[in-house]
Image (tube, rainbow, N blue to C red):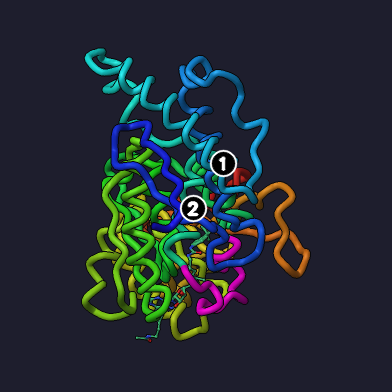
């Protein structure tokens, strides 16, 4: 039988089984399966303080990722410690308290990486020249999306949609890092959609293995401009769209769909859907800018696009009172005077 390495679950789920030799399809060392096992053990010990006591000594200080025996010994020590911690917790209320919490941001990043390593056998099939190619998700988009989460209020009433979701990493991150009622991703291309199915399966398996919580999510195959997806966008209260490379046709079609969003709905994009200094006039009444406030979000400290210039993101908040105020001022000339004369240059 092939040489196996097993890791017992800290949550009492099925053990995860790796087959030796471990270098997964990626070949490059950083995807080396053995390193992933070491990192997984490290994250479980970080998450479970009682593991320190259960491990005779820090097993993570001497192992050789090129030797099966060494990796086997590491896994055996880890498994014995996990078995004793899980056995100790049986019958106490500890499992309930510890289990079913959201993963920490560091652990979630690791889970998304190991999900990707296992679900995407051949990353060359993905067009890797995208600014946010799935292969380098951890180095780029992950921190960016963390920053977005910190900058916009998110509640359990929110419905999240990622338009053009690729293999689904942003949707999985939002489902495990925010209380959104549901997170949706829509992806039209064959290859990323196929990989997204695999990402879905592996993600659910790993979250169960770690005993971590995540909200409901769906990775959907389809073109988000098709009518069958209109009500998904209409129902959304948080829309992410990495539209930097979209042409005028797609941008125009998206604006048409955004006109049906609820007041308060937020759109975060890598290119703004209306000028930052948009002012309503009687010549632009049909522009989307009349029903939204746009602001530029501070770019990630130190993050630059691959052209080296700092990247910016745009937050749009739907607010139809903006247009109502414009008509109030028309109807109510004295308001107009105060507007013209006013020193406070009240906001549009
Ligand atoms: C009717 C008609 O005209 N149809 C023509 C097609 C119209 C466009 N419709 C599309 N529908 C579905 N998926 C389509 C269509 N257009 C293209 N994609 C897919 O988007 C994927 C690329 N995705 C990235 C995939 C990973 N997800 C992300 O990186 N998400 C994300 C979102 C926002 C951000 C912030 C908040 C920072 C702004 C950061 C990351 C972006 C760049 C659009 C590719 O896999 C494309 O196949």
Provide the residue designation for mark 1.
39
Q: Tell whether circle 2 marks a residue whose Cβ is less than 8 angstroms from ligand 1.
A: no
Looking at the rendered structure, the secondary structure element under dot 1 is: helix
**Residue 1, position in %: x, y?**
39, 57
Q: Is residue 329 visible?
A: no
**Residue 322, position in %: x, y?**
41, 56
Which image quadrant for residue 8? top left
Which image quadrant for residue 179? top left
Q: Could you tell me if the residues under marks 2 and 1 are in contact, i.e. CB atoms within 8 Å? A: yes
* Residue at the (37%, 81%) spot, across then down: 190
57 sits to left or right of 288: right
Residue 83 numbered tag: none
Residue 114 numbered tag: 2
92 sits to left or right of 283: left
* Residue at the (62%, 48%) spot, across then down: 67
259 versus 67 height, above or below? below
Compare marks 2 and 1 and give the one earlier in the sequence: 1
* Residue at the (52%, 21%) spot, across then down: 55
Farthest residue to the right: give it: 308
Pick the front one: 48 or 326: 48
Q: Is residue 111 visible?
A: yes
**Which residues fall within the magenta stretch?**
121-136
Looking at the rendered structure, the secondary structure element under dot 2 is: helix
Could you give the CA–CA distance between mark 2 and mark 1, rounded to whole angstroms?
10 Å
Residue 124 is one of the magenta-drawn residues: yes
Residue 11 is one of the magenta-drawn residues: no
């Amino acid at each position: 039988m092939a040489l196996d390495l097993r890791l017992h679950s800290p949550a009492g789920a099925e053990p995860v089984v790796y087959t030796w030799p471990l270098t997964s399809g990626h070949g490059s060392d950083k995807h080396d399966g053995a390193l992933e096992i070491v990192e997984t053990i490290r994250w479980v010990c970080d998450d479970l303080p009682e593991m320190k006591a259960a491990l005779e000594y820090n097993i993570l200080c001497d192992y050789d990722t090129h030797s099966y025996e060494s990796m086997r010994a590491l896994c055996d020590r880890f498994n014995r410690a996990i078995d004793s911690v899980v056995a100790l917790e049986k019958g106490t209320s500890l499992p309930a308290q510890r289990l079913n919490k959201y993963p920490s941001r560091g652990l979630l990043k690791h889970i998304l990486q190991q999900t990707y390593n296992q679900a995407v056998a051949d990353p060359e099939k993905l067009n890797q020249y995208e600014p946010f190619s799935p292969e380098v998700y951890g180095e780029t988009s992950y921190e960016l999306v963390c920053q977005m989460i910190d900058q916009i209020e998110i509640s359990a009433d929110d419905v999240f949609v990622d338009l053009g979701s690729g293999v689904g990493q942003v949707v999985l991150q939002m489902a495990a890092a925010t209380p959104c009622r549901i997170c949706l991703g829509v992806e039209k291309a064959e290859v990323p959609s196929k990989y997204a199915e695999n990402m879905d399966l592996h993600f659910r398996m790993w979250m169960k293995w770690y005993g971590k919580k995540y909200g409901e999510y769906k990775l959907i195959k389809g073109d988000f401009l098709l009518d069958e997806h209109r009500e998904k966008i209409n129902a959304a209260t948080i829309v992410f769209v990495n539209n930097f490379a979209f042409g005028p046709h797609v941008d125009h079609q998206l604006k048409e769909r955004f006109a049906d969003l609820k007041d308060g709905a937020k759109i975060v994009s890598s290119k703004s859907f209306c000028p930052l200094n948009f002012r309503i006039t009687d010549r632009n009444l049909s522009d989307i800018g009349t029903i939204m406030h746009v602001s530029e979000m501070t770019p990630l400290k130190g993050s630059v696009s691959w052209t080296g210039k700092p990247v910016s993101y745009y937050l749009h908040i739907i607010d139809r009172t903006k247009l109502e105020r414009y008509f109030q001022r028309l109807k109510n000339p004295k308001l107009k005077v105060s507007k013209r004369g006013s020193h406070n240059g009240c906001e549009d």
